[in-house]
Structures are given as C-alpha cells and as structure tokens.
Amino acid sequence: MTSPAQHSPAASVPVSPAAETAVLPAVAPAAPAKQDAPAPAVGIPRPADAQASQAATLDAREISAWFGDRKVLDRVSLTMPAGRVTALIGPSGCGKSTFLRILNRMHEMIPSATLAGEVLIDGEDIYDPSRRITQARRQIGMVFQKPNPFPAMSIYDNVLAGLKMTGVRADRDTKDALVEECLAKAGLWKEVAGRLRQPGGALSGGQQQRLCIARSLAVRPRVLLMDEPCSALDPTSTRRIEQTIAELSSEVTIVIVTHNMQQANRVSDQCAFFLAEQGTPGVIVEHGPTDAMFNDPADPRTADYVNGRFG
Ligand SMILES: Nc1ncnc2c1ncn2[C@@H]1O[C@H](COP(=O)(O)OP(=O)(O)OP(=O)(O)O)[C@@H](O)[C@H]1O
C-alpha cells in the first residue's frame, strides 16, 4: 500500500475513507467481431503474467491531483472492471485527462504536478516504489487525442516501436505475426497489408489512429487508456474506431475520455461523470452502468449534462 505522502506535497491533506467506488456487476463482454481476424500468433513474446485474456481491473482509490498549489482532483475513486469499457465524461476542465494520465503514471512527468492516492492493477499498486515506471506503461497503454505515429517510420516499424523500447527481442517471423495480429485487432490489416513499408505519416487520420492503437497493442497491455481518440476524426473514421473498441474490449480493459455523449452511450459499459463546480477540484458526481447514467441518473446534474443542458 502506498501512502499519499509519497506522491504529493500535500501530505497533510486529510483523505476521507468515504469516497465512493464504482464496481459493475459481472456481465459477459460482447464477443469480438470475427472479421479481419488475426493470424495465429505462435511464438510471439508474451509477458510472463499474461493470461488468455490479459484484461486487468484498474482500481483508482482516493485520487487527488495538484498542479503547483492548485488542486484539480479531489479524492476520486473508481473501479474500471477487467474487459469492460469505462467512459469518463464531464465538462471541459473537470480533470478527466488528468485522472487518465494518473492511471499510467504520465501525470508525474509534468513539472509541478503531484498526486495522492493509489492506482491498483489487479490489486498491485502501480506507484509502489519497488515497481518500475516502464512496467506500468507496458501494462497500461495510452492512445491520444491526436494520432501520433512516427510519420517517417514504416507502418510495420510503427507497430513494433513500443516493443523495441521495452527491450523485447524477436525473430522476423515472430515480428511479422505480431504486426499482422495487432493491425488486425486495430481493424487496419486489410487496408495496409500490401504496403507495410510505407511511412505511417502517409495514412489518413483515422488510419493513423488505428495504427497508434496497433502500436499500443504490440506490448500486450492489460488496460488501454484513450483520451478523446476520435475528436480529430471524421464520422466514418470515428465509427471504425468505435468498432475497434468493441472488438478489443473482451481482451483489454478500456478507459475512454469523450465529450461525445452519443459515443459514450454507444461504446461504454459504465460511465463516470466528473464535475468541477465554481473553481472547486474535480470530483465524480455519479457513476454506474451506462444505461442507468443516460436513462435514469440519480443526480440532476448528470441528467442535465448527458442531455446537453450544460457543458
Ligand atoms: N499541465 C498543466 N499545468 C497546469 N494546469 C493544468 C495542466 N493540465 C491541466 N491543468 C488544469 O487542470 C484542470 C483539469 O484539466 P484536465 O485537462 O484534466 O481537464 P479535462 O476534464 O480533461 O478537460 P478537457 O475536457 O477540456 O480536456 C484544468 O483546470 C486545467 O487547467
């Protein structure tokens, strides 16, 4: 167990045990679509802890965050169940992206940024001082708002880029199989199979975003964080990414930040509604199964937000 004092200058800030935590009932995830199925991935290096489904439960407990002296999140707790899609929704500036960055130790890379609380992946604290930061990053991948492939690098090498950084060595056949598997899972294989040596920057925006998803998948993450992954994309590419999310969700836990309520409704199993009222730090007002959040929310502010009355 990690003390908040290890992450924050605000060690004296009282941390209430009363923060709520959302856990969904166990429901079987939808079966992935069969089309564009990957080739068998025999011999592909897998992390020692990988299971048949590598999805892990991510548990954020009492997360508070600061930029300098300014507190932007206050004791946010949320369980993101294995193999499910969790959408983080809420108006601009309420701390959704900050929360997401805390989930894979990117927040601490920002000068002046500090935090308190715990993030557990299948019960293990990713902020435990004995764990390396690269371990968290490998297990918990991130896809950003703007597609960010290495533009001059080939499509093939883009997929393998993360693998190289983690120091995993593989022979040519293994790499070929991994590239095909990840591109297929990201829904891009059929479109690029004949031009793997072309630069990643030559793809369309939607294809680049799916290439970034394939790149994230190559290190076999157990959780995939997505920060408004479709906001720079056209409706057709957006639909394709949403389809990819549905196909991936049985094998990797997905946490997505989105401003698009229709998208949150379409892709997620559960939602958490963040709000920072009148200059106060962001909190989770309400969370729960997506159907309930959209059709029968408990808090009137949630109803107002999901129905577009503010934000
Ligand atoms: N690097 C930073 N330095 C200082 N303050 C920051 C930084 N990043 C975010 N903030 C502040 O933290 C608060 C939460 O920002 P965050 O980006 O997490 O909100 P958000 O809900 O994701 O917003 P949006 O929906 O507009 O992306 C905001 O008040 C923002 O101004």
Image (cartoon, rainbow, N blue to C red):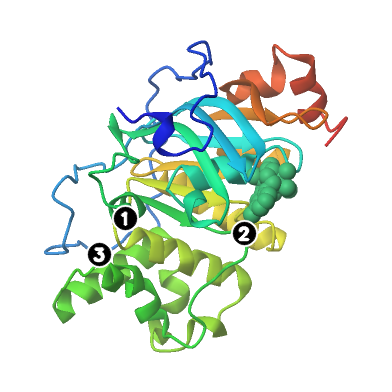
Q: Residues within 10 Å of mark 2 (few under 14, many from 20)?
A: some
Q: Residue at x 60, y 56 (%)?
A: 229
Left or right of 91 on screen, residue 32: left
Q: Which mark is residue 239?
A: none
Q: Residue at x 55, y 26 (%)?
A: 76
Q: Is residue 32 visible?
A: yes
Q: Quadrant of the C terminus?
A: top right
* Disc 2 to disc 3: CB gap under 8 Å: no
- Along the polypeptide, which appears first: circle 3 or circle 1? 3
| SS class, disc 1 | helix
Residue 139 at x, y = what percent?
Answer: 31, 49
Cβ(mark 3) to ligand 1 < 8 Å? no
Residue depth check, mark 3 versus mark 1: number of the one nearer the observer: 1
Q: Amino acid at mark 1?
A: Arg
Residue depth check, mark 2 versus mark 3: number of the one nearer the observer: 2
Left or right of 305 on screen, residue 223: left
Residue 236 at x, y = what percent?
Answer: 66, 61
Question: Where is 114 relative to 14, above or below?
Answer: below
Q: Residue at x 55, y 40 (%)?
A: 99
Left or right of 237 on screen, residue 186: left
Q: Amino acid at mark 3?
A: Ala
Q: Which residue is mark 3?
A: 39
**Disc 2/disc 3 C-alpha distance (Å):** 29 Å
Q: Which residue is mark 2?
A: 145
Q: Which residue is mark 1?
A: 138
Residue 4 at x, y = what percent?
Answer: 43, 30
- Along the polypeptide, which appears first: circle 1 or circle 2? 1
| SS class, disc 3 | loop
